Amino acid sequence: MIDKEKLGNYPAITPKELEEAAAQAVRQTRAALVEFGEAFKGIYSEHNFYSKADNCQWTNGFWTGELWLAYELTGEEDFRRTALKHTESFRIRLEQEIETDTHDLGFLYTPSCVAAYKLTGDVKSRETALLAARKLASRFHEKGQFIQAWGSMEERENYRLIIDCLLNLPLLFWASEETGDPMYANIAKAHLDSALKVIVRSDFSTYHTYYFDPDTGQPLKGVTHQGYSAESVWARGQAWGVYGIALGYRYTGKKEYLPLFESVANYFLEHLPDNLIPYWDFTFSEGSLEPRDSSAAAIAACGFLEMADLLDSEKAMNYRKKAMCLMKALHDVCAVKEPSISNGQLLHGVYGRKTPYNDCIDHGIDECNLWGDYYYMEALVRLSKKWRPYW
Ligand code: GLY
């Protein structure tokens, strides 16, 4: 566990480092665009290099999102053209129902189609994102008041939510803003309340997933999918909580989310090792040989920056400073500095690590992953300019 004083003394990324980091991220995106053309990238790298992939994973929106971020930083037409081309593929994916039986529709359609609409006014992208929002809303269970994470809505064993879904809710809030129909936002608010009640433990650590009783809607139990064990604290899950609560506060204005954010965020910070790059689960601490998950730090940095934008006080400065310390650590330890090292942005992430107590497999260990790349770049953009969030 990192002591508070040490965190307070950790250096923040400097303006010069930030400028270099943003320029590097753009160079990486440019080089990858030449390599990938209009194709998508796989979920994670192998030996730090991504391969081409179809648009059929939960992660496809992130590469498109990186292209939009690079477009925002440079105004270069190549980024815009390819990102817009991707939105056509996202439309086909929805029409053909390719792996759309999931709450991940927010991760897929927000950084791709919502971003496209916000940045270019493309009406087809707006229409596609609204269709995705409708599909996401259809995953809401009245009994339990939550959005089901994965799979068929008919199977009793699927009756659960996961913390990651907090990042899918902005698609619903956006759909209500666009259409004037409160149904989407009402579902998002109900899910937010149900999720935060059960997944945040009394010490402000979090469960990854939580089951409900399909007959009564009563909360049943917390379980992990990608964390070390049911009762451990999956670092990325905690980071989804940090960013998700900040976004929840933005859309609802609920004052009770402010102390909750602070406590969940402090738990994250206080369990970082010395170099601020979290182990993949907070079961592990300084000196462990377990891999780190850089993507968790990038997500948390965006959460701090989001909350800083919503507050007008010393607290905002404090949250911004924390994000800048995380970004300094990511830039120094994990950022790809040139295309010969990797065709991603952020090294040292973990997608899934098998343990005797979880049900995932070993994959994407000590590799880049698409959300780590995307959120690292989002944080760079947030720090470089006044940014209108896609989320
Ligand atoms: N949302 C899935 C993950 O964070 O791996």
Image (tube, helix red, strand yellow):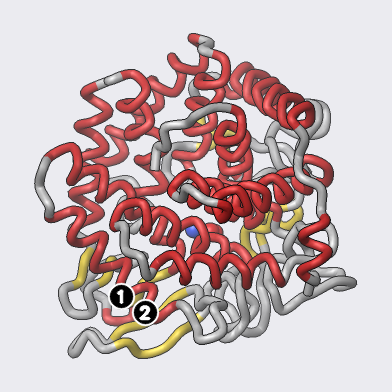
The part of the image, by quadrant, that contains residue 212 is bottom left
Rounded to the nearest whole Å, what is the CA distance between mark 2 and mark 1? Answer: 5 Å
Q: Residue furthest right?
A: 287
**Amino acid bearing label 1:** Ser
**Are there few (<14), some (14-19), or many (20+) residues within 10 Å of tag 1?**
some
The part of the image, by quadrant, that contains residue 336 is top right
Residue identified by numbered label 2: 197
- Please, is residue 391 above or below residue 154 in the view? above
Name the spot of residue 111 as percent of width and height, x first.
42, 37
Name the spot of residue 49 as percent of width and height, x first.
72, 37
Q: Quadrant of the C terminus?
A: top left
The answer to whether 184 appears left or right of 88 in the picture is left
Question: Can you tell which mark lies on residue 340?
Answer: none
Number of on-image labels = 2
Q: Secondary structure at mark 1?
A: helix
Q: Quadrant of the N terminus?
A: bottom right
Name the spot of residue 280 as percent of width and height, x first.
69, 66
Q: Is mark 2 within 8 Å of ligand 1?
A: no
The residue located at (66%, 72%) in the rendering is 354
Residue 387 visible in this rendered orientation of the protein: yes
Residue identified by numbered label 1: 194
- Please, is residue 34 above or below residue 384 in the view? above
Q: Secondary structure at mark 2?
A: helix
Question: 299 or 324, which is in the foreground?
Answer: 324
Name the spot of residue 196 as percent of width and height, x first.
39, 73
The residue located at (45%, 75%) in the rendering is 209
The residue located at (72%, 25%) in the rendering is 19
The answer to whether 237 appears left or right of 44 in the picture is left
The residue located at (71%, 70%) in the rendering is 270
